[in-house]
Amino acid sequence: MYGLELPEGTDVELVDRLHEGFLVRQFQRGNPEAFVALVRRYERRLLYFLRRFERDSERALDILQEVWMTAWSTRMSLQSDAAFRAWIYRIAHGKIVGAIRAEMRQRRTERERQYLTATAANCTGATFESAELVHFALSQVSPEHRSVLTLRFLEGMAIAEIAEVTNLPVGTVKSRLHYASQEILSVIEEQENARK
């Protein structure tokens, strides 16, 4: 790890957390090397998170760049180095939700009803692998439900962490997870019935 040989019995996760805490403190002081190290540490996971909402790779990369620019310019707002993960995901969540809302407003002015009807017709009868079906179902649920499902099941975050990322009360996160699970199961069942 980090080019060092750790003694046997060393708590690797603790060392990793301490190293990240050091990087975050240096980042907050404006150290560009620490910033680059944090980008490298989180860029793949953040891009994966953003791609659950934005299928266009180029657009997802643009949003990821916005996330890092916002992180740099607002780095002093980070309260604790231990909260970096939730803080950076909250920025990513805000950027992708903002992009989705802007896109939705644009679509409304471009004959949204016809577009949605055509999309639904194109999806009917398609053959889906299990993972593709889940990702399709995720794309069909509301952005609010999609974000809590993605953070919980694909990113493995605890409910409290999701609450921090989405800036919602824990009870609201639990409620959204419950209704989102029902919604996604309904979409999957519809697709499976359509294939029969």
Image (cartoon, rainbow, N blue to C red):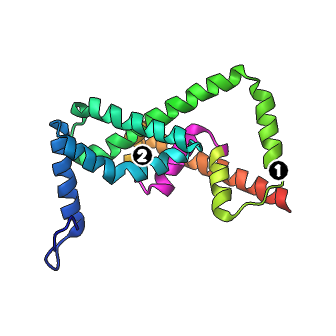
In the image, residue 74 lies in the stretch drawn in magenta: no
Tell me which numbered mark, 2 or 1, is placed earlier along the sequence.
Answer: 1
Return the residue found at the far right.
Answer: 196
Identify residue type, mark 2.
Ile
- Measured in 3D between alpha carbons, the distance from the residue under mark 2 to the one under mark 1, in whole angstroms, is 33 Å
Query: Residue at 73% of width from left, 22% of height from top?
Result: 110
Kindly identify the residue that appears in the image at 32 percent across and 53 percent down.
41
Residues drawn in magenta: 140-159
Q: Quadrant of residue 90?
A: top left
Q: Report whether 156 appears left or right of 177.
A: left
In this picture, is 125 found above or below 102?
A: below
Task: Tell me which secondary structure the magenta stretch mostly adopts.
Answer: helix
| Quadrant the N terminus occupies | bottom left
Q: Is residue 109 visible?
A: yes
Element at label 1: loop
> x%, y% of residue 9?
17, 78
Give the label on residue 23, or none.
none
What amino acid is found at the position of numbered circle 1 in the picture? Thr
Q: Residue furthest bottom?
A: 8
Question: Is residue 147 a member of the stretch shown in magenta?
Answer: yes
Residue 94 horizontal/vertical position (percent) = 44, 33
153 relative to 11, above or below: above
**Is 89 placed above or below 196 here?**
above
Residue 66 locus on image (x, y percent): 40, 33
**Residue 162: numbered disc:** 2
The quadrant of the picture occupied by the C terminus is bottom right
* Residue hosting label 1: 124
- Residue 167 in view of the camera: no
Residue found 45% across the figure and 42% down from its top: 171
Check contact, mark 2 vs mark 1: CB within 8 A: no
